[in-house]
Image: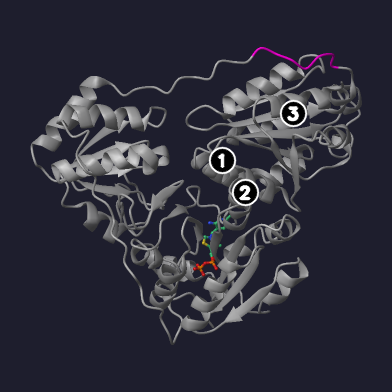
Amino acid sequence: MNGAESLVTTLVDRGVDICFANPGTSEMHFLSALENPRMKSVLCLFEGVCTGAADGWYRMKDTPASTLLHLGPGLANGLANMHNAKRASSGMVNIVGEHSASHLKYDPPLTSDIEGLARPLSHWVRRAESSTTIAWDTATAVAKASEHPGQIATLILPGDTAWQDAGDAAVAAPVAPRRKAPDAARVEEIARALRSGEPTLLILANKATRGRALELAGRIAAGTGCRLGSQFFTARIERGAGRVPLERIPYAVAPGSAFLSGFKHLVTLETKEPVAFFSYPDKPSLLKAAGTQVHALVEVEEDSILGLEMLADALGLRDTAPILQPRIETAVPSGALNPTSIAHALAAAIPENAIVVDESLTTGRESMGYTMGARPHDLINNLGGSIGYGTPVATGAALACPDRRTICMVGDGSAMYTIQSLWTQAREQLPITTIIFANNQYAILKAEYANMGAGTTPGPQAMAMIDIDRPTIDWVAMAKSMGVPGVSVDTAEGFHQALARSAQEPGPSLIEVRLY
Ligand SMILES: Cc1ncc(C[n+]2csc(CCOP(=O)(O)OP(=O)(O)O)c2C)c(N)n1
């Protein structure tokens, strides 16, 4: 086998069996190796879709996907969603094609500093120097990407390494690192704070917001009366009826600070204390009140299940029944579309076990509160703030969970960054409903203009950088051009009906929610 075949064989042997690809000439041997029937290859028409889809895959599976990117420019196109994935602690293995060393010295057009581009957004970067050692390089990349928290591993594949003989691909398995337990003294200090009855908020993140960790937190809340919260953005939360409910710390500085003001203790799990998303001239960066103590129960690289078991044991609450969210039946709304009626329609229509990817920005601000008691579902947010994450992440999540409906809520401005995702969704016939909130503007920036103190309202030149209404985007036509059926709605009942109907149909669809 050649180096490229050795690489692909090693990926699938280590459980990385999907590749989000956008190939070029230097990756032809890798393409040929993708004929391996154990590897699923998914073509994405922009590299930001590849890296975002790998993020979505990891969020649902907790195992890395691979991407194939074409030299430095292909990698550069994928960087923004690599940044979002890194902030969400999603592991991935990027394979980046490169010229052979013998060709590089002539400075051909696609030459660039690939390591330099990769390093700031990768935890691990390596140039595969030989086809005979590439199996080990690949196994190391997969082990790195699979660590907790997930890591971004980038492996550069020169052409000659891909096409030369590699011999036998088998390599010894690197040992999976064990997840670390929190320090017992720290757990005891937090148990003391909880026993004191002083107002305490546990802030859960990353792997603490689901499964056994979430349930243990629910037991501790039931037994101590502490409250459970999440940052405004979380990698994945299991929520809805029958799940342990988490209160969301508000996004804006004033309501965020007000929410936190009553707590004497903030206890963090796999996250840090809440900070404002941006710095403003006259607002604080940290949201907690003066005098509030912050305790790290579980550091980002530690194990939340272990930490919460230790805390529950220290409090004698391991067998206490957890607090659970009751089902709230929401009446189907009618009339005008606005954030509240949209939230009601979502709450009524979210199907059992759906995956909700939220990039709805201003329009969806109300949705999370109203969907607390909806049918159980998973919620995915963007932790990196680089817009254009939603439709690619939905694509990867749906490939990871093809038996579930993925609902992707996205602002029209955000959707335009990576709209090519629709084409991949159509080609793979993925069960995704994309909801475009078409307000013809970057609405959040209007509010931020005043928040930032730039003036009360933007002038005409500034407004021209915030409105996206000239020309108006035809979302249904755009979706149709990529093979996704679409419908436009302008009432709350129309939105609810379209959403409920889309969940009954097998493949992708798009709903344009007309807000103008
Ligand atoms: C890569 C990147 N570029 C620019 C921005 C700045 N930005 C933040 S929100 C936003 C507009 C979002 O508009 P839309 O998705 O339509 O949501 P709306 O604000 O209208 O609710 C922009 C341009 C960003 N966050 N990331």
* 2 or 1: tag closer to the N-terminus: 1
* 3 or 1: tag closer to the N-terminus: 1
Picture quadrant of residue 96: top right
Can residue 271 be seen by looking at this rendering?
Answer: no
Residue 254 lies, in percent from the top left, at 28, 60
Point out the quarter of the image occupied by ligand 1: bottom right
On the image, numbered disc 2 is attached to which residue? Answer: 396
The amino acid beneath tag 1 is Tyr
Q: Are marks 2 and 1 in contact (CB under 8 Å)?
A: yes
Q: Is residue 419 left or right of residue 168?
A: left
Can residue 494 be seen by looking at this rendering?
Answer: yes
Residue 238 lies, in percent from the top left, at 40, 49
- Element assignment for label 3: strand
Query: Which stretch appears magenta?
Result: 166-172
Q: Which mark is residue 431?
A: none
* 2 or 3: tag closer to the N-terminus: 3
Residue 349 lies, in percent from the top left, at 46, 70
